[in-house]
């Protein structure tokens, strides 16, 4: 009934209008019968009444179902619960009965099996059919189950057996105790060991950290490491931040932990520090070195000290490396690279015969200073070495400066880094100073001589214009560059020396000036030192010369200036003095003058020749039109030093009259 | 020259931290930058689209057919940039006129800049054509008025920090302007206003983070790729510090919107 009710509610509502099949119809009738009683009693009217009365299940059917449930009708809300209850009760009863039957047959089978020990009491009929089928027929023999009765209460063990058991128990107890003691013992050992280890580790860590802190306090940047973090958790960076790539990578060393926690230096740090050495050689003999003797012992020195040494060594090595690269471009300037030594020509002023060279190399720092060599040029070697170091340091800060500028837009051409001008600067300084100094010594000599000869000559020299105005340049300093860098930047530029020689003129109003500009560039366009002589425009037109002349060596300038000054004296000064009497007949510095010395009144022609050579002024009176090389001087006078007080004009006036 | 750009923003409380990070990344100290920017608008009427086609006669049309593909002329706003120093904002001396004159070998102070609309291509960075011309002498404002002809629109100031990281130029800056003065101004100020008179355009004080790579050989794919990669590498490097993003292309539009003044009645479209 329950099932059928359920199936009704599950039906979709309203029911489909389709024709019911025969089975469905039968099913419906069955359902109706169970719900409403016989088909005959069900009319539309009765159903309507039921609905109006609010009853889903007609009372009649419930009444008809069972009479004895009538009393409980009031308690039970519906017939369905009732039916449930009954069904459950029936099921329970059935299961109890089943259980009872099972127990009974079991008991029967057990008793029969026990009895079957007796052959007389063996019969299949004694057993339950079930046991017969599944037990006996499957091979359970008769009499296979026995029952006996015994009394165990008064069982006594024999004394030796008791003894043995007690012994065993005792022994087991002792063994257990011993084992426990042994375990405790080893545990204590382990803990002690661990404590000792911990203590050691702690000491080690403390020491390591102390050293790290002391390194860090000295200002070295400490960096954490990712790989091998167990043995070397930290590394120190001592390389210079703007070093070239190769050296930058080397400026970094892990700080490894030793057994006792002190820091072991990494191989890169522990490498023998190198130093950069400049030696001066004169005619093949070493006469000066920049090397200082180092007596300290590398094995036991503080960590900071060795880091510092490594840093220094890195700078020196980079310096040497950069210079050895630079040598390749400088072979034409007398720079040579042999056996890891850079040879630089450094001629000395006024002593061209001496072969002075600078020898630059890189040696281990603690190499002993070679004995048996001169020390008179130690100052030079040290200054050169310091200058080169300064130049590299300057290059480093310029690298940062260049890096900070706006980069040019990307192009297909890669920007090439020019090698830093270290040797070039050194060469330029040596050459410039040498060239300028020798020129100015000569000019000074000439000036002095001319002055003693009564000619009003003034000399003004500046070895390097930028050096001269250094203070002003630095005062108006740029913000983006430090003063040191601005100072050193001056050395990167071409050197310009300037000498102005003021010569007297005939009228004395407007002095004539000769300007010699000495420019030194190691590279384009002059490839060395160049002297540019500029003549005043009056001189150019009077003497018929070019306005500008360029010379490569000091010797050329000297000889040209000698000729030029003597020409100026003869063709301009003396010519204007004896204006109508004088005559210029050649391009040589000689003047043909009509002399009045002959008493007959017939003028004789005499040549006056003026020669300037090595700071000596020589005036010669000779017969006119004599060949230039002839030595038949009628009269001559030479000015060579300050002790002579005869003026040139006077001397010549005396001659000429 | 082309510019590859990525932009980000740094709020005021964070900018000091970002400066420190950038100083580490670029391994250099920040460079203080002050700039004045003046915007000019061309006065010229853009040629009407299709005006160059020559509609006058049949035969002429045939002859000029090839020219029909020419893009309509668009006009752009241009900038005038003046590099300033901090002292300029406190300078007391009065100057009578603007002058772009600089000594030989000195860096030019004034420059004229043109920025195109960013390219449409999708490379993950903003790419646009720019052109900067340094002015070495003369009155820059007069120059701008005459060459165009242009009209002064407005001026503003930029202060910030610049870093250079390889080829990436990092410019962390914010904009300032003089409040109130803009509407009545007809030409750029000759005297730089005092620093205290300037106000931030963004009152929160946030900085604009501008990462730029400049590319000369734009048509060389290798060079362009290298530039884009360098900028993107920097972008990933800065991840977690500053979020660098591709700006909206049309937000960087520099074109002048063309409004034909006399609208014929026939062109009025029903809505």
Image (spheres, coloured by chain):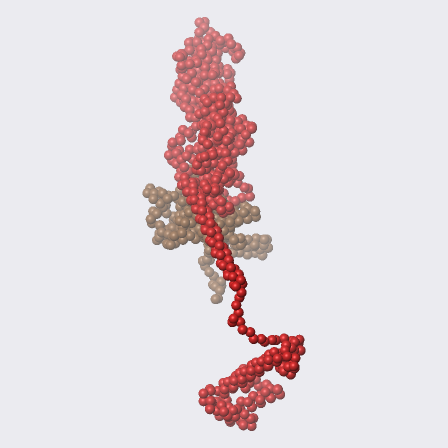
Residue nearer the viewer, A126 or A305: A126
Q: Is residue A62 above or below residue A435?
A: below
Residue at the top extreme of this rendering: A600
In this rendering, does residue A560 appear at all?
no
In this rendering, does residue A457 appear at all?
yes
Q: In which quarter of the image is the C terminus of chain A?
A: top left
Q: In this view, does B227 lie above or below B48?
A: above
Residue at the front extreme of this rendering: A159
The residue shown at (45%, 29%) is A295
Instruction: Please state the horizontal and vertical placement of residue A353, each as a whole percent of the image.
Output: 51, 19
Instruction: Please state the horizontal and vertical placement of residue A388, each as a whole percent of the image.
Output: 47, 31
The residue shown at (46%, 44%) is A234
In the image, the chain rendered in red is A
Q: Quadrant of the N terminus of chain A?
A: bottom right
Q: Say left or right for A524 vs A648.
A: right
**Where on the picture, by quarter, is residue A498?**
top left
Residue nearer the viewer, A367 or A379: A367
Instruction: Please state the horizontal and vertical placement of residue B85, each as a whole percent of the image.
Output: 38, 43
The residue shown at (51%, 9%) is A631
The residue shown at (54%, 30%) is A340
Q: Is residue B144 above or below residue A498?
A: below
**Where on the picture, by quarter, is residue A99?**
bottom right
Instruction: Please state the horizontal and vertical placement of residue A62, each as a whole percent of the image.
Output: 51, 90
Q: How many marks?
A: 0
Residue nearer the viewer, A218 or A590: A218
The hue in which chain B appears in the rendered picture of the protein: brown
Q: In this view, does A317 lie above or below B78?
A: above
């Amino acid at each position: 009934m329950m099932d059928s009710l359920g199936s009704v509610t599950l039906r979709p509502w309203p029911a489909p209008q389709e024709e019911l099949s025969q089975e469905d119809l039968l099913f419906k009738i069955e359902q109706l019968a169970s719900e409403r009683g016989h088909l005959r009693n069900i009319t539309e009217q009765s159903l309507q009444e039921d609905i109006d009365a609010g009853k889903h299940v007609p009372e009649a059917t419930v009444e008809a179902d069972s009479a004895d449930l009538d009393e409980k009708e009031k308690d039970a809300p519906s017939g369905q619960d009732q039916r449930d209850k009954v069904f459950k009760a029936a099921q329970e009863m059935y299961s109890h009965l089943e259980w009872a039957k099972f127990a009974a047959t079991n008991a029967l089978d057990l008793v029969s099996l026990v009895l079957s020990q007796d052959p007389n009491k063996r019969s299949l009929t004694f057993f339950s059919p079930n046991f017969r089928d599944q037990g006996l027929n499957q091979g359970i023999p008769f009499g296979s189950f026995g029952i006996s009765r015994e009394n165990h209460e008064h069982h006594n063990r024999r004394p030796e057996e008791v003894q043995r058991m007690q012994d065993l128990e005792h022994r087991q107890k002792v063994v257990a105790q011993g084992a426990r003691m042994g375990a405790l013992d080893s545990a204590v050992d382990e803990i002690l060991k661990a404590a000792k280890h911990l203590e050691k580790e702690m000491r080690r860590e403390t020491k390591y950290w102390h050293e790290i802190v002391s390194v860090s306090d000295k200002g070295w940047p400490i960096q954490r490491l990712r790989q091998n973090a167990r043995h070397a958790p930290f590394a120190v960076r001592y390389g210079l931040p703007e070093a070239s790539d190769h050296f930058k990578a080397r400026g970094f060393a892990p700080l490894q932990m030793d057994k006792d926690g002190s820091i072991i230096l990494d191989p890169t740090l522990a490498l023998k520090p190198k130093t950069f050495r400049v030696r001066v050689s004169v005619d093949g003999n070493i006469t000066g070195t920049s090397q200082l003797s180092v007596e300290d012992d590398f094995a036991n020195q503080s960590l900071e000290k060795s880091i510092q040494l490594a840093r220094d060594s890195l700078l020196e090595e980079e310096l040497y490396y950069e210079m050895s690269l630079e040598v390749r471009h400088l072979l034409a300037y007398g720079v040579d690279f042999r056996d890891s030594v850079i040879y630089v020509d450094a001629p000395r002023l006024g002593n061209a015969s001496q072969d002075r060279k600078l020898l630059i190399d890189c040696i281990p720092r603690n190499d002993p200073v070679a004995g048996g060599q001169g020390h008179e040029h130690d100052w030079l070697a040290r200054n050169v070495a310091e200058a080169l170091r300064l130049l590299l340091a300057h290059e480093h800060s310029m690298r940062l400066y260049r890096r900070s500028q706006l980069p040019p837009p990307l192009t297909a051409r890669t920007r090439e880094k020019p090698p830093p001008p270290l040797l070039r600067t050194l060469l330029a300084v040596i050459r410039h100073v040498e060239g300028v100094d020798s020129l100015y010594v000569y000019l000074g000599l000439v000036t002095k001589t001319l002055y003693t000869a009564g000619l009003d000559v003034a000399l003004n020299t500046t070895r390097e214009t930028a050096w001269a105005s250094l203070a002003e340049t630095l005062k108006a300093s740029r913000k983006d560059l430090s003063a040191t860098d601005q100072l050193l930047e001056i050395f990167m530029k071409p050197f310009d020396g300037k000498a102005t020689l003021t010569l007297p003129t005939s009228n004395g109003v407007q002095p004539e000036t000769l300007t010699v500009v000495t420019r030194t560039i190691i590279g384009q366009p002059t490839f060395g030192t160049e002297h540019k002589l500029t003549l005043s425009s009056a001189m150019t037109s009077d003497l018929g010369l070019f306005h500008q002349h360029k010379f490569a060596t000091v010797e050329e300038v000297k000889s040209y200036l000698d000729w030029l000054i003597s020409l100026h004296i003869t063709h301009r000064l003396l010519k204007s003095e004896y204006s109508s009497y004088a005559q210029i007949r050649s391009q040589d510095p000689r003047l043909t003058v009509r002399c009045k010395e002959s008493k007959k009144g017939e003028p004789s022609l005499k040549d006056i020749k003026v020669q300037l050579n090595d700071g000596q002024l020589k005036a010669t009176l000779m017969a006119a039109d004599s060949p230039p090389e002839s030595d038949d001087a009628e009269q001559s006078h030479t000015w060579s030093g300050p002790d002579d007080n005869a003026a040139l004009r006077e001397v010549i006036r005396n001659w000429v009259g | 020259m082309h510019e590859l750009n990525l932009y980000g923003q740094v709020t005021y409380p964070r900018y000091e931290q970002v400066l420190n990070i950038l100083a580490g990344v670029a391994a250099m100290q920040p460079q203080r930058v002050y700039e004045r920017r003046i915007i000019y608008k061309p006065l010229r009427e853009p040629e009407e689209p299709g005006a160059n086609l020559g509609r006058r006669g049949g035969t002429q049309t045939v002859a000029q057919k090839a020219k029909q593909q020419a893009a309509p002329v668009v006009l752009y706003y241009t900038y005038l940039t003046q590099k300033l120093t901090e002292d300029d904002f406190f300078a007391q001396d009065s100057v009578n006129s603007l002058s772009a004159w600089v000594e030989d070998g000195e860096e030019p102070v004034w420059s004229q800049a043109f920025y195109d609309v960013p390219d449409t291509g999708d490379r993950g960075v903003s790419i646009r054509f720019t052109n900067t011309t340094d002015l070495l002498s003369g009155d820059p404002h007069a120059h701008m008025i005459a060459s165009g002809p242009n009209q002064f629109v407005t001026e503003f100031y930029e202060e910030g920090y610049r870093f250079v990281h390889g080829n990436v130029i990092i410019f962390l800056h914010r904009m300032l302007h003089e409040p109130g003065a803009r509407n009545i101004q007809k030409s750029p100020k000759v005297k730089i206003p005092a620093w205290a008179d300037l106000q931030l355009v963004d009152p929160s004080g946030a900085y604009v983070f501008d990462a730029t790579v400049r590319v000369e050989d734009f048509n060389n794919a290798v060079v362009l790729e290298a530039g884009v990669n360098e900028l993107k590498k920097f972008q990933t490097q800065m991840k977690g510090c500053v979020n660098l993003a591709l700006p909206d292309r049309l937000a960087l539009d520099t074109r002048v919107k063309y409004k034909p003044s006399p609208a014929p009645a026939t062109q009025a479209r029903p809505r």
